Image: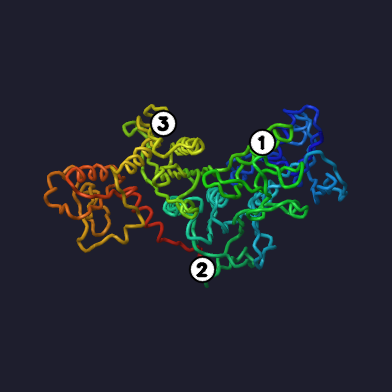
Amino acid sequence: MKVVIVGGVAGGATAAARIRRLDEQAEIVVFERTRYISYANCGLPYYIGGVIADPETLTLQTPESFYTRFRVRMKVRHEVTALHPERKTVTVKNLETGEEFEESYDKLLLSPGARPAQPRLPGMGISRLFTLRTVEDTFRIKSYIDQAHPKSAVLAGGGFISLELAENLRELGMEVTIVQQVGQLMEPFDPDMAAFLQSEMRRHGVKLALGRTVDGFEETDGGVKVLLKEEASPLCADMVVLAIGVTPDTRLAGAAGLELGVKGSIVVNDRMETSAPDIYAVGDAVQVRNFVTGQDTVVALAGPANKQGRIAADNICGGDSRYTGAQGSSILKVFGMTAALTGLNETQARAAGLDADAVILSPMSHAGYYPGGKVMTMKVVFETGTCRLLGAQIVGYEGVDKRIDVLAAALRAGMKATELKELELAYAPPYSSAKDPVNMAGFLIDNLARGLLKQWRLEEAASLPQDGSVTLLDTRTAEEYAQGHIDGFFNLPLDELREHLDELDPGKPVYVICQSGLRSYIACRILSGHGFTCYNFSGGFRFYDAVTHERVLTEKATACGMDQ
């Protein structure tokens, strides 16, 4: 059996190694148009920032090492320019010599990945405008920084690559501005959770121009002028990096008549088979099923690509492996903060037609009595009625990764959100609490399901009646209340509540808030025990204060011609 693989990163390299492990006699040829195979593209921003000092560490394998271990012919600087399913060949161009030839196959695997989105804007070809997707892109940026010593950069786009690059450029001492078309960073997060990331970026000097659209670029004597729509003043910087997302690279598949789907991606079944016989496809270029909704989608992540490569390899070698869908589990370092998510956010769940709700809590990373614990903010999304777990987002400083992984596993296992309370998780004071934050989310959702708790949410705050028809109660201490509170809420500390119950009107609903949500929950149980109808604020005043202040702030970068 002869297997030809187009693309030697992530899915392609994984598939090649797996095929060899399953079939020692197979002839395996991989064509990769760049000079590098099996490289760690997730580490590229950290090489630019100097965190990763040796560029060779980005390359997990070389063509030589891959051949030595797996006897796979890795042909770098060879671009496949056409597919011929009818005669089971591909046209290949040697980019070093210009030679073109056809290569036959018994099985063909497409792993072309994705290419940076390149909008048709004026000035796209200027020299100080970069994209960051490949090792070559990284070296171009690194070389420019080392030689030109730029002092400022504009990053167009507010996703993973942009935030990671912003951090690394700031660590080099550069002034950094992120321009994002939508009104928040990191669209996979709900706006309320993204507010924490925006605060952390600003705290480290990154300027944010949110809700702004790039309209073109002009080269100047000193750098690049970034033109903005909405009559906004242009921005000036020494360099610009486009990080506005990626597009499935499916030009070959489309030209060969393979079925295409969402965003022009290659349609595959759960065996990673395309619409053409003996042709498989994996990675950023393929359409997959969203594990939570069952809807078709595109997920450009290394984890799914590697799993798909293994599944395709199994099936190429006569097995029957299936890909059950992607849930988009991701994690991101933002200076000292960690942000992670899995499954659907609340916005996505509702857009998919699901009756979604969420709980927000702010637990400590480990036992409060053990020194060094830090607060994290968790948002767990579930389906009302069924309590089906839909997704989760966590932002914090410690312990975020372990909690999101537990929640990702629970989601994959089909657990209900209420069942999170039953998980038996490892506990010792330096690492967790006897009731882990994941358990606490389960307790909250279980209380909601049982009717022991009613909650009110951030989006309701502006519409709460201020005419005395409801009771607005803040159960924090007087000192906390004095440092900041929501207008219209009066202060009655939790530990004094029982002594003042006769001062409250039992005929009025009570909306309660505290710093984190715990004391206000206890207050709700007290009030409910005395016949009151009450609602606990989800997330606490800490959450309210952080989100509302970030949501209304849109910081503009320095306009051209102004002092920097």
The kind of residue on which mark 3 rests is Leu
Vertical position of residue 166 compared to residue 209: above or below: above
| Residue 405 position within the rendered picture, expressed as x and y whole percent measured from the top left | 49, 36
Please rate how many residues cluster around mark 3, counting C-alpha atoms within 10 Å: few if below 14, some from 14 to 19, many from 20: some
Q: Please indicate, yes or no, whether residue 308 appears anywhere in the rendered image.
A: yes
Screen quadrant of the N terminus: top right
Q: Secondary structure at mark 2?
A: loop
First in sequence: mark 3 vs mark 2: 3
The answer to which of marks 1 and 3 sits earlier in the sequence is: 1
Secondary element under disc 1, as helix, strand or loop, is helix
- Going by the numbered disc 2, the residue's amino acid type is Met
Give the percent coordinates (x, y) of residue 42: 61, 43
Which residue, as the protein is rendered here, is positioned at the far bottom?
A: 231
- Which mark is first along the chain, 2 or 1? 1
- The answer to whether residue 101 is above or below residue 15 is below
Q: Position of residue 226 (x, y in %)?
A: 59, 65
List the residue tagged with mark 2.
Answer: 562
Examine the image and state in which quarter residue 28 appears: top right
Amino acid type shown at disc 1: Ile
Q: CA distance from mark 3 to mark 2?
A: 56 Å
Please tell me which residue lies in front, 27 or 33.
27
| Residue under pointer 3 | 423
Residue situated in front as seen by the camera: 57 or 448 = 448
Q: Residue at x 18, y 49 (%)?
A: 492
Label 1 with label 2: CB-CB less than 8 Å: no
Instruction: Name, please, the residue furthest toward the front.
Output: 385
> Where 556 sits versus 193, above or below?
below
How many residues crowd mark 2 within 10 Å: few (<14), some (14–19), many (20+)? Answer: few
**Residue 311 got which mark?**
1
Mark in the foreground, 1 or 2: 1
Question: Where 355 falls versus 52 (above or below)?
Answer: below
